Amino acid sequence: GDLQAQGLNGTLNPSQCVASQVAAAVSCSCAPEGYTCSICGEGRVSLSPEKNISVSGVESVNCGVLEMSGLDGRLTPADCAVVQPIANVACDCAPEGFTCSICGDGYIATSRNETFLPGEPLTCGEADDDGKAGRLTPSVCSSYTPLALISCGCELDTDSPPPATAAPSTTDTTETTPPADTNMTGGPNEATDSPGDFTPAPSSSIEYSGGEQPDAAAAAADFRLTLWRVLTVNVASVVIVMGWAAQ
C-alpha cells in the first residue's frame, strides 16, 4: 500500500519503481484491473465442485470455492497458472455443455442393467445417462468406451437424426458444342475471310505503373537498408532508456 501510494505520488524514481514492480508482482498479488479466471480454463467448467484438492501446500481447497474466487477476481494470473493444471484433473473439468455416449457417438447401450467396470456396481445404463447428462468428463467417457463395447450391447442409435449431407449442385454442367462456322484456331475463316485478311492477335504483355519492370536486386537492397535504419534507431532508444533508468 505504501509503495503504491509513493509511486502514484511521484516519489519513486524510475529505477526504484522497476524494482518495486518486480517485488510487488509476487508479494502484493498484483493482477490486471478487472482480471478474472476459471480454474478449469476458458470455456470449461468443474463437474465436481464439491471435491477438495491440495494446492501449493494448502491441504484442502474446495473446487467450487476456488472457482468462485477466480470468477470474482480474487485470484491473480500467477495463482490461476498454478491451479489450472491441478484443477483440470482433480475437479473433473470438462468443456462447457459437453455430453457423450459411453458406446461412442451415434451408438446406444442396449444392455442397460449390465455392469461393465471390474469390481464396480455402476451399470451401463447409469453410466450412459451420466454421459448424456454432462456428468462425465471427456477422459472418463473415453475410458469407459472400450469396456462398454464389450459388455453393454452397443448398437447403432436408429432414432438419432442422420448426419447432414450437402445439397446436390444445381449448376448445369452440360457441355456445349460451338457452331461449326466458329473460328476456333485464330486463322482465317474460310467462309468469310480471304487468306490475305488474316492478322495474328497481338501478344499480351504486363505493364508496370512505373513504366519499367522493377529490379528485384535493387528492391532487396532498399529493404535491407531500411531494416538496418530501424534496428539502429531501436538500439539507440534502448541505450537512452537504460541510461535514464540508472540515474
Image (tube, helix red, strand yellow):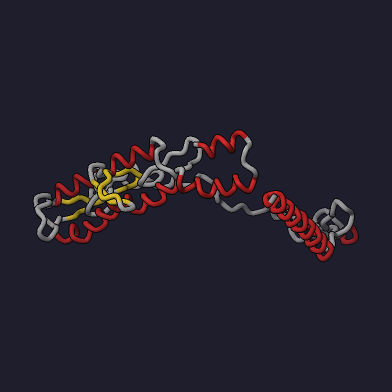
Q: Is residue 6 left or right of residue 93?
A: right
- The total of numbered circles placed on residues is 0
- Residue shown at 46%/38% (left/top)? 35
- Considering only vertical position in the picture, is 46 above or below 206? above
Give coordinates of residue 78: x percent, y percent: 44, 48
Foreground of the two, 35 or 61? 61
Give coordinates of residue 169: x percent, y percent: 49, 47
Q: Is residue 96 left or right of residue 9?
A: left
Give coordinates of residue 234: x percent, y percent: 73, 54
Foreground of the two, 236 or 189? 236
- Residue 190 showing in the rendered view: no
Q: Quadrant of residue 64?
A: top left
- Residue 70 showing in the rendered view: yes
- Residue shown at 26%/50% (left/top)? 59
Q: Quadrant of residue 6?
A: top right
- Residue shown at 36%/53% (left/top)? 85
- Residue shown at 84%/63% (left/top)? 218
Foreground of the two, 158 or 7? 7
Q: Is residue 197 left or right of residue 18?
A: right
Q: Residue furthest bottom?
A: 217
Q: Is residue 223 left or right of residue 139?
A: right
Give coordinates of residue 172: x percent, y percent: 55, 47
